[in-house]
Amino acid sequence: MTTYTVPSVSIATARTGASSKPNALGMRTMQERAYAKRGEQYLLIKSPPASGKSRALMFIALDKLHNQGLAQAIIVVPERSIGSSFADEPLSQHGFYWDWAVAPQWNLCNAPGADDPKVAKSKVKAVGEFLASTDKILVCTHATFRFAVEELGLAVFDNRLIAIDEFHHVSSSPDNKLGNQLGELIARDKAHVVAMTGSYFRGDSAAVLAPSDEAKFETITYTYYEQLNGYQWLKSLDIGYFFYSGGYTDAVGKVLNPALKTIVHIPNVNAKESMKDKQREVSDIMNSLGGWKGTDPLTGFHLVEAKDGRMLKVADLVDDSDATKRSKILTALKDPAQKDNRDHVDIIIALGMAKEGFDWIWCEHALTIGYRSSLTEIVQIIGRATRDAPNKERARFTNLIAEPTADQTLVAEAVNDMLKAISASLLMEQVLSPRYDWTPKNAGAKVGFDYGENGYQNDAPNVGINAETGEIHLEINGLKTPQSPEATRICKEDLNEVVTSFLQDTRTLERGLFDKENTIPEELTQLRMGKIVSERYPELTAADQEAVRQHAVAAINITQQAKLMMAQADVIAANASDVLDGALAVNTSFIDGVRKFMNVRDLDIDLIDRINPFDAAYAILAKSMNEKTLRQVQTSIAGKKANIPEDEALYLSNRAVKFLNERGRMPDLQSADAYEQRMAQGVAAYKRYVVQAKAKQHG
């Protein structure tokens, strides 16, 4: 079989087994952490897929019902298939005080067609009957709950627990009904709320909660790194992208290894990558695997004979023309008797399904075609492959991206799609990296951190690792310490949100990746990131905004430089036996990359500001994209270079004032320092904007 190189970053894990080790009450690490905060009225659990959020909610809800005096618990899920996550559980068999049991008539997700708005609305009567009963637990969809609030009002939910799963579906946008209702529920302040999300950053545009509402929530954060590091079997996760030209089905065969348990997510029919015939696309994918030999009458799975003679079982979740056939396939996939059977199914091909709440522990490869506009969707797709399972040592996520070519009529649009896909890959690298714990230089060793053979040393590039939490302690000269509680919380909990905004800024990506010769790193790290922080957190003081900016820049640059150091250190296996379906096999861990970066540089915040955050991404991109296409993209980006916008000119002018205070002179246009030149250009541009404004004012 021909192997194709898919550029990727590999996150290696310690396999401590902590993620699956229960305590005396039957709780895993994240669940124990959440249960410790069970007395809070408002709880927000930010934890990755497969970490046990559903069961954590069961523990908390049962305590609220038995010990905290709440009358009932209502569990709200986005679609009825996820309702199965809250099926009966004999928790007492594992040491807990009570069992989780939902009366059949109160699991409204089991009703046929419950996702349909009309059916969901008809369930409002059932919600009312439950509220009037002495029963304790109800499970329903987001839609049913929305209609129930509209018809029954808020007061009926007083002294009850409202638990919202997949909380990233909620938004503070005026157009989001559930978000508005939640805001009203919080304002009334007579119900308890537990919110759970696998995306421990708020979506991609509108915030999930208004800042005033979010401040009321106690947050339990369990990172992806902690989750993966605590697995028993999974050693590493590869994240990569592969560029293709022509139809995507021709490229699928190059990266789809039939030996790996795989979920393939094909593009929406309205996406540019789509061939506008989803059944044909599924057929082409199966043909790339081998010859079709019929369907299994019991499961509805397609039988495809692979080129090596194995008979593959392929579940088609795309074809919705026959409801009975589709129901048979879904039932077969969810068959509890087959949950531990690795050979039950080999490949799943899906369009909109098999993302949230779809649990197939044997999945080793999540392959998606085309960019996904929502990072939350990327997190959910990757989550399908990151379940721990016996003898499953490697998982991967591959994004097939259409390569911009000269014969495309909308080159700029294709470049934009490509940038979004790269952005998602970079963001996932950030999500998967450890949490950082920064201190000033020579602040001393932190308890619980391992500093290597020689231990902590003054005036040394110390890197401390907390094996239990996966945190990395780094010392950085000149890094500002946040002063207010809110800035401290942001630096500890919400840096991924800041980085998300930064990496999803199209102009930032264009300049950082494809206009490197004309872009000064400080334009990205200080100007663009500074603007994002000041707009996102206008209530913070200027000093705290600068502290958040510095922490965010440090987080992304250290992550990317560690990746670059790994590549430069030749840690990528060269022999074919180490290349698994094209994913680059990294034989060292992310921590090694951080140590290599630290060992050659005494970290200083000014130095970090002078690093282009996209250096590592460009190094990988240059290997995967042919030179002609790369030049074409660079030309397209360079041709869009515009004058300094007014908001950037103002920011550069403020930087120039700081420069004046520090050096006693204004920035010089003729300076040999490129960023000093840029500040001077910003001052000149801002003066022009002021003159133009005055002229306009005076006619």
Image: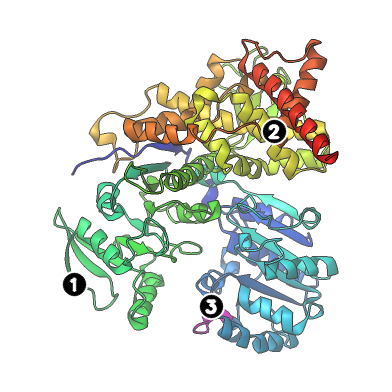
Q: Residues within 10 Å of mark 3 (few under 14, many from 20)?
A: many
The amino acid type, in three-letter code, at marker 3 is: Asp
Split into 4 quadrants, where in the image is the C terminus?
A: top right
Residue sitting at the far front = 699
Q: Residues within 10 Å of mark 1 (few under 14, many from 20)?
A: few
Q: Residues within 10 Å of mark 2 (few under 14, many from 20)?
A: many
In the displayed structure, 125 sits above or below 489; it is below
Please say if the residues under marks 1 and 2 sit with CB atoms less than 8 Å apart.
no
Any part of residue 550 in sight: yes
**Foreground label between 1 and 3:** 3
Mark 1 or mark 2: name the one nearer the start of the chain: 1
Give coordinates of residue 18: x percent, y percent: 54, 46
Mark 3 or mark 2: name the one nearer the start of the chain: 3
Give coordinates of residue 627: x percent, y percent: 33, 30
Which residue is labeled 1 in the image?
294
Region rendered in magenta? 108-116
Split into 4 quadrants, where in the image is the N terminus?
A: top left
Residue drawn at x 73%, y 85% as measured from the top left: 134
Q: Is residue 178 left or right of residue 153?
A: left
CA separation in Å, label 3 and label 2: 46 Å
Which residue is labeled 2 in the image?
648
Please state which of residues 614 and 518 is positioned toward the viewer in this rendering.
518
Which residue is labeled 3 in the image?
115
